[in-house]
Amino acid sequence: MKKTTKRLIIIILICIGLIAGIRAVMENMTPAIGILEVDGPILGSLDYLDIIKGFEEDTRIKAVIVRLDSPGGRVGPSQEVYEALLRLKEVKPVIASMASISASGAYYIACAADTIYALPGTLTGSIGVILEFVDVSDGLEKLGVSAHSITGGTLKDAGTPFRHMSEKERQYFEALARDVHEQFMEAVSEGRGLSEEKVMEYADGRVYTGRQALAIGLIDKLGGLDQAIEEASERAGLEEKPRIIRPKEPSGILEGLKRLVQTYMPIQIRSNSGTLSGGYLRLEYSIQ
């Protein structure tokens, strides 16, 4: 009797294992839509680029949704993600879905998509560039503290917080910001099919609600993630309900603290010979 019971249990376990295995195989064969989540300040691009590359190479993933909930961030990473999505769009549909906020660098990224969705109350736009500097020279003077720089180039310490900015330095930084701003506007013009003159009307750094953005052509449709998934399925020619694949990102208290610190610390731009402006140059597409 005991042997019969054991055999029955073994047979049942084998059947359960087979059923689970068959279900897993069938599920993996079901076409999928990948979701790239850009959440929080854009501080780097490597994780996003890895995910995009994985989505591009995975034949089971037929379309990609970029879910944006970000105030923007650093210029370089925003441009890298934008370019990677343009390449992905050549082989698979890419749909942008905006959550509560998708502005500045996040809007730059959205412009790579085939279609941009936003909620009526989403904050988006903010087509602009910001350079921030701190001047502590007057305070240090009151404390009897002075700082000096020895440079091998007249603009090497431009933007240092230890003295007032000269007119030459101000013109230098204005030209730098203007050039990056023009790059932003060019991306919007190309991605949205708008003339550069029209983009300039909206590129003064202000944010728009989703409803306002729709009226001026900065987005395509009002809707949430469900509507974005529906369009992605249609563009990919999927007849059955697709699987949704979301790569997991690091989480926890330590990861949260790390992101918080990175958000508010000055951005250091390094070269082989040192740092630009003592590491206090902050060039971003972001809402401050």
Image (cartoon, helix red, strand yellow):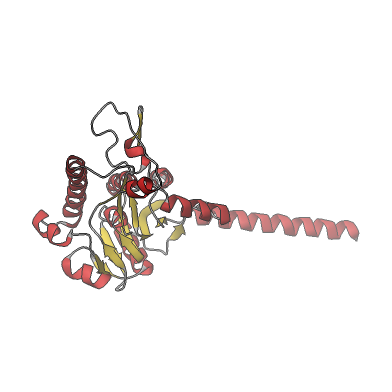
**In the image: residue 53, left or right of residue 202:** right
Q: Residue at position x 75%, y 56% from top?
A: 11
Q: From the top left corner, tell me how far across and down residue 238 is, in percent.
A: 36, 60
For this orientation, the residue located farthest to the right is 1
In this rendering, the answer to whether 150 lies above or below 5 is above
* Nearer-the-camera pick, 48 or 267: 267
**In the image: residue 212, left or right of residue 4:** left
In this rendering, the answer to whether 262 lies above or below 149 is below
* Nearer-the-camera pick, 215 or 62: 215
**In the image: residue 252, left or right of residue 267:** right
Count the marks: how many?
0
Q: Residue at position x 33%, y 49% from top?
A: 138
In this rendering, the answer to whether 268 lies above or below 30 is above
Res. 122 visible in picture: yes
Residue 166's quadrant in the figure?
top left
In this rendering, the answer to whether 242 lies above or below 270 is below
For the N terminus, the quadrant is: bottom right
* Nearer-the-camera pick, 46 or 227: 46
For the C terminus, the quadrant is: bottom left
**In the image: residue 81, left or right of residue 126:** right
Q: Residue at position x 18%, y 57% from top?
A: 192
Q: From the top left corner, tell me how far across and down residue 278 is, in percent.
A: 36, 38
Residue 165's quadrant in the figure?
top left
Q: From the top left corner, tell me how far across and down residue 78 is, in percent.
A: 32, 48
Res. 91 visible in picture: no
Q: From the top left corner, tell me how far across and down residue 62 is, in percent.
A: 37, 53
